[in-house]
Amino acid sequence: MAILSQWNWTWPAIALAFLLGAVGSRWLFFKLGFGQKQTVNKEYFKGLNFLLNEEPDRAIEVFIKALEVDSETVELHLALGGLFRRKGQVDRATRIHQNLIARPSLTDDQRMQAIHELANDYYKAGWLDRAENLFSELKDSSGYRVLAIEGLVRIYEQEKEWQKAIDVLRLLKRGERKGLNRQVAHYYCELAERSIKIGEYQIARQHLRNARSEHSSIARSLMLRGDLRSAEGDHVGARELWLSLAKSQPNYAELIVEKMITSFGGNNDVVGMKDYLLNVAVVPKNADAFKLWQESLEDILGQSKSIDHILEKSQNEGMSATLADYLLSALTDNKLGDVRRVDLLKKMLGRAKAKKIEYTCVDCGFDTKAMYWFCPNCGQWESFR
Ligand SMILES: [Zn+2]
């Protein structure tokens, strides 16, 4: 059944696309009327027939042979090759594109387009070396420069060759890619992280300097500067940097919770630890970070007081899945007591009552308290869920 249903649309769709391309081209118009090219024409319909009968390999044979006689159908071959690749049939796409490139009659632009397609085939097939060679060939061309550079960046990202990714991105001109500086800064962060891990602190420092001069406000470089200090044994300095991150970009505050707690342990700063645990900027949503924070809090305050504190904190923040899980198990284990249980229930119901959002437009994300048929923000009908 699966084969049948796949057949139902796959090959007719490809054949139809092919045929439509042919109808649109000068090629069919001429060839239908002129006797001497009838043979080529017939070959193409034979090929289409094979496609419709789900015999793509025989179809490719026919098309490739026809191409030797008639080079005006290059576009159709490119379209067919692209279709095969998108359907995951990379070996077929590769055959078509390799054959195209071998034709001496191609224009420069057609050849480059075919090389670009073949590079994408190789990339999709996981032959990164071959894809890299072809993209490199194209990166000095005028028409495919940006595409080739982007292709190379994708490869280097996959191979974690961050320096190569930086070097090739530098070939882009200003404005050719949005967010270029942020991207390069993150590559430097990757390099720095690796250097810290293997103890090359001096090199890490240089990478972080580069990251900062590339983009001054990315959170990750600030965090890694703290990591570097910490690795070098400067706990106080590390915590200062991490805290400045949590302060300037609160949505990253939870990323430092584990680092901070471990660091206070690192130089036995119990007073500092207590202060931090009580005043942590956000209750961590990450389960591991939450567990460490909650357990450390319990060590210092005792069970009863730490639950009080967590309940109080949870009042001011949304209920994350992690926090709900913790409160639920505290409730089940009877750790809350009657007063706290009623208190928690009241707070939760009170918060639900004051909720501002009941419905959200699935198309644009517009939030409302009332249900509309028509989204006042994006104009979509029946888009509220
Ligand atoms: Zn909308």
Image (cartoon, rainbow, N blue to C red):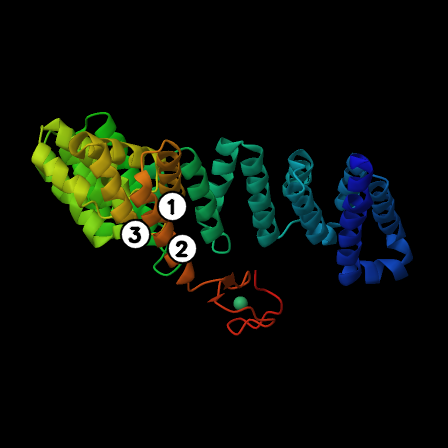
Q: Nearer the viewer, mark 3 or mark 2?
A: 2
Relative to 221, 126 lies left or right: right
Quadrant of the image containing the N terminus: top right
Residue at the far top in the pictured view: 198
Q: Amino acid at mark 2?
A: Leu
**How far across and down, in percent of the image, does residue 280 sit?**
21, 45
Mark 3 or 2 closer to N-term? 3
Q: Is residue 16 visible?
A: yes
Regarding mark 2 in the picture, which secondary structure is present there?
helix
Q: Is residue 220 visible?
A: no
Regarding mark 1 in the picture, which secondary structure is present there?
loop
Contact between marks 3 and 2 (CB within 8 A): the answer is no
Residue 344 marker: none
The residue singled out by tag 1 in the image is 320
Residue 315 marker: 3
- At x 51%, y 37%, the residue is 131
Query: Vertically, is 201 above or below 365?
Result: above
- At x 75%, y 43%, the residue is 68
Q: Amino acid at mark 1?
A: Ser
Q: Quadrant of residue 46?
A: top right
Query: Vertically, is 310 above or below 128?
Result: below
The residue nearer to you, when weighing 190 against 57, is 190
The residue nearer to you, when weighing 118 against 243, is 243
**How far across and down, in percent of the image, does residue 218 sit?**
26, 50
Relative to 318, 22 lies left or right: right
Q: What is the crowding at mark 3: few (fewer than 14 residues within 10 Å), some, or many (at least 20)? A: few
The residue singled out by tag 2 in the image is 349
Quadrant of the image containing the C terminus: bottom right
Contact between marks 2 and 1 (CB within 8 A): the answer is no
Q: CA distance from mark 2 to mark 1?
A: 16 Å
Query: Vertically, is 6 above or below 23?
Result: above
The residue nearer to you, when weighing 337 against 361, is 337
